[in-house]
Amino acid sequence: MKKLTLSLCLLAAATLAQAQVTIHAPWVRGTVPMQQASGAFMQLSADKSTRLVAAQSPVAKVVEIHEMVMDNNVMKMRQVPGLDIVPGSTLDLKPGGFHIMLIELKQQLKGGDVVPITLVFEDTQTKKQFTQEVQAPVTALGGGNMPMKH
């Protein structure tokens, strides 16, 4: 009985030690027929030092974390290995900055659709990874969001 109690306490402690990430206002930009890529955007905050290290979605063959930067007066987009979420601040994934790229789309993304995305995080202290699911509504083209420049 003592071993069972100890095991349950250790399991509870490990669960509590995992960082909690709050995901606010997720959305995905709608596409036109045959378009092969789109972006996912949201705000992330955490109660512990955490890193977004990957993402996946059944609507795309490839999902990457990207940033857009100015380089010699040219806007460039490139993949990054991950993004730190600092406790007490918000990581803003937005058009023209950091975002999640959905590449080789399997279907058109239409306004009103919902895109499931699995975000993979790493607790920066323990190096343990964990996932969180998000259901991101698709915003119709021309829905007032800032255009993504590729």
Image (spheres, rainbow, N blue to C red):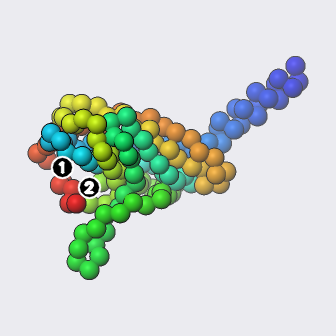
Mark 1 and mark 2 in contact? Answer it, CB < 8 Å.
yes
Question: Which residue occupies the extreme left position in the image?
Answer: 142
Of residues 64 and 112, the one drawn nearer to the viewer in this rendering: 64
Find numbered disc 1 in the image and state the secondary structure of the residue it sits on.
loop
Question: Which residue occupies the extreme top position in the image?
Answer: 1
> What residue does disc 1 label?
145
> What residue does disc 2 label?
95
Which quarter of the figure is the C terminus placed in?
bottom left
Q: Earlier in the sequence, mark 1 or mark 2?
A: 2
Find numbered disc 2 in the image and state the secondary structure of the residue it sits on.
loop
Please give the name of the residue rendered at 18% of the width and 54% of the height, measured from the top-left corner. 146
Of residues 29 and 106, the one drawn nearer to the viewer in this rendering: 106
* Image quadrant assignment for residue 125: bottom right
Task: Give coordinates of residue 127: x percent, y percent.
Answer: 64, 51
Please give the name of the residue rendered at 47% of the width and 48% of the height, measured from the top-left corner. 54
Instruction: Examine the rendering and report whether any part of residue 72 can be seen.
Output: yes
Please give the name of the residue rendered at 24% of the width and 30% of the height, measured from the top-left corner. 113
Task: Give coordinates of residue 58: x percent, y percent.
Answer: 37, 34
Task: Give coordinates of residue 76: x percent, y percent.
Answer: 28, 68
Q: As shown in the figure, which amino acid type bears the numbered disc 1?
A: Asn
The correct choice, above or below, for 64 with respect to 150 in the image is above
Mark sitting on residue 89? none
Task: Give coordinates of residue 56: x percent, y percent.
Answer: 42, 41
Q: Is disc 2 surrounded by few (<14), some (14 to 19) or many (20+) residues within 10 Å?
A: many
Q: As shown in the figure, which amino acid type bears the numbered disc 2?
A: Pro
Relative placement, left or right, of 66 versus 46 is left
Which quarter of the figure is the N terminus placed in?
top right
Please give the name of the residue rendered at 18% of the width and 49% of the height, measured from the top-left corner. 145
Question: Which residue occupies the extreme right position in the image?
Answer: 2
Relative placement, left or right, of 46 versus 67 is right
The correct choice, above or below, for 125 with respect to 40 in the image is below
The correct choice, above or below, for 107 with respect to 46 in the image is above
